Image (spheres, rainbow, N blue to C red):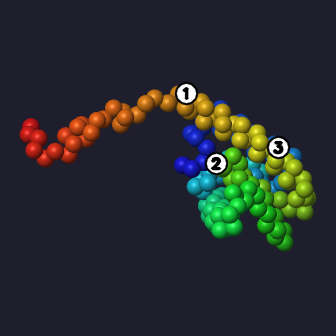
Amino acid sequence: MSGPDVMFPEEQQQIAMVCQRLQRDANAKAVLLIGRDGQAIADAGDVEELDVTSLSSLTAGNVAATGGISKILREKDFTSQFHEGEKIHVHITLVGGKAILVVLFDERSSLGLVRLRVKKSSDEMSRLFDQVATQSKSNSQPSILTEITAKDHANLFNDSVKI
């Protein structure tokens, strides 16, 4: 997964609460948090009528394409995008380089309000992702693969071994 490290239920709940608060405070229709691989992580608001899986993977593809444009232009990354529709507007933001925050809103909100609330929420999510990464590193154990020597490797594939 190219999103945040594996999250425990407590962190998942905290991320979901940040999404819910953002949806409420920005007066948005819906908020989605997805991994850069297109996998949905959390959502809030009116998502029942959305094809969240398709929207997530298409958004990840859009972000990847925009990343290609930024490289051509020798930019580090374009961290946010805005798409204005007739009824629904889409604000997309990279969060800590690990996830994509998507805010869907209509005439009941404004781009300025969404940007303001997204900044606060994405900072909070970045801190949570850093906390998850730190916790993941402290809980990890060395891989058994690091104990295998070149001789062990050669013996694994040696056809002359007789049983």
Residue shown at 85% from the left, 48% from the top: 117
Residue shown at 55% from the left, 27% from the top: 138
Residue shown at 78% from the left, 59% from the top: 91
Image x and y of residue 51, in percent: 66, 61
For residue 143, say whether it is visible.
yes
- The residue where tag 3 is placed is 120
Q: Earlier in the sequence, mark 1 or mark 2?
A: 2
**Quarter occupied by residue 158:** top left
Amino acid type at mark 2: Lys
Q: Nearest the camera: 42 or 135?
A: 135
Q: Are marks 2 and 3 in contact (CB under 8 Å)?
A: no
CA gap, disc 3 and disc 1: 28 Å
Residue 84, numbered label: none
Q: Residue furthest bottom?
A: 86
CA gap, disc 1 and disc 2: 20 Å
Q: Earlier in the sequence, mark 3 or mark 1?
A: 3
Q: Nearest the camera: 148 or 13?
A: 148
Amino acid type at mark 1: Ser
> Within 10 Å of the Cα at label 1, are there few (<14), some (14-19), or many (20+) other Cα atoms?
few
Task: Report helix, strand or loop for mark 3.
Answer: helix
- The residue where tag 2 is placed is 98
Task: Report helix, strand or loop for mark 1.
Answer: helix
Amino acid type at mark 3: Lys
> Within 10 Å of the Cα at label 3, are there few (<14), some (14-19), or many (20+) other Cα atoms?
few
- The residue where tag 1 is placed is 138
User: In the figure, 43 relative to 51: above or below?
Assistant: above
CA gap, disc 2 and disc 3: 17 Å
User: In the figure, 144 relative to 115: above or below?
Assistant: above
User: In the figure, 95 relative to 81: above or below?
Assistant: above
